[in-house]
Image (cartoon, rainbow, N blue to C red):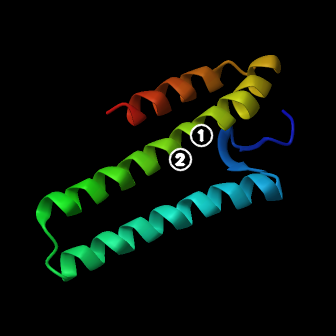
Amino acid sequence: MGDCCKSFHGIHDHKTRTDEETRKLLNRLRRIEGQIHGIEKMVGSGAYCPDILMQVSAANCALNSFSKELLAAHIRGCVADDIRAGNDETIEELVAVTQRLMK
C-alpha cells in the first residue's frame, strides 16, 4: 500500500493528503458552512419558506459535489492502489460506501 491510506488492523482509517488537497477540501467545506449560516439567518429573520428551501437545495448540491470529489479521489488513489496490491476487500468497502451514499 502506498502513502494514500494507512491500514490499522485491516481497516482504513487514515488518509494522507497533500497540503493542496486538504486546502481545497477545507475551502469547499467552509463555503458550505457559510451557506448553512446563511440559512440559519434566513430562518431567524422569518424569510419566505421557498427562499429558504432554495438555499437548502443549494447547500445539499454543494455537499453532494464535495462527496463526489472526495469519492473520486478515494477511488483514483486508495482503491486503485489497494487493487494493484491485491487487496480486493477494498472493493467491498467501496461498494458499501457507495450504497450508503446512494440512500
In this rendering, position of residue 47 left or right of residue 81:
left
Residue hosting label 1: 69
Assess disc 2: are there few (<14), some (14-19) or many (≥20) residues with their C-alpha within 10 Å of its C-alpha. some
Q: Please tell me which residue is depicted at 72% across the width and 61% down the height of the picture.
A: 23
Question: Residue 69, relative to residue 62: is it above or below?
Answer: above
Amino acid type at circle 2 is Phe
Residue 56: x %, y % from top left:
29, 57
In this rendering, position of residue 42 left or right of residue 84:
left
Residue 86 makes an appearance in the image: no
**Of residues 69 and 51, the one drawn nearer to the viewer in this rendering:** 51
Classify mark 2: helix, strand or loop: helix
Assess disc 1: are there few (<14), some (14-19) or many (≥20) residues with their C-alpha within 10 Å of its C-alpha. few
In this rendering, position of residue 54 left or right of residue 9:
left
**Of residues 70 and 30, the one drawn nearer to the viewer in this rendering:** 30
Q: Please tell me which residue is depicted at 28% across the width and 79% down the height of the picture.
A: 41
Residue 94 makes an appearance in the image: yes
Question: Residue 48, relative to residue 89: is it above or below?
Answer: below
Badges 1 and 2: C-beta atoms under 8 Å apart?
yes
**Of residues 39 and 78, the one drawn nearer to the viewer in this rendering:** 39
View extreme (right): residue: 2
Name the quadrant containing residue 24. Answer: bottom right
Amino acid type at circle 1 is Glu
Q: Please tell me which residue is depicted at 60% across the width and 21% down the height of the picture.
A: 91
Residue 4: x %, y % from top left:
79, 41
Question: Residue 14, relative to residue 76: is it above or below?
Answer: below
Q: Which mark is residue 66?
A: 2
Image quadrant for the C terminus? top left
Residue 13: x %, y % from top left:
65, 48
Image quadrant for the N terminus? top right
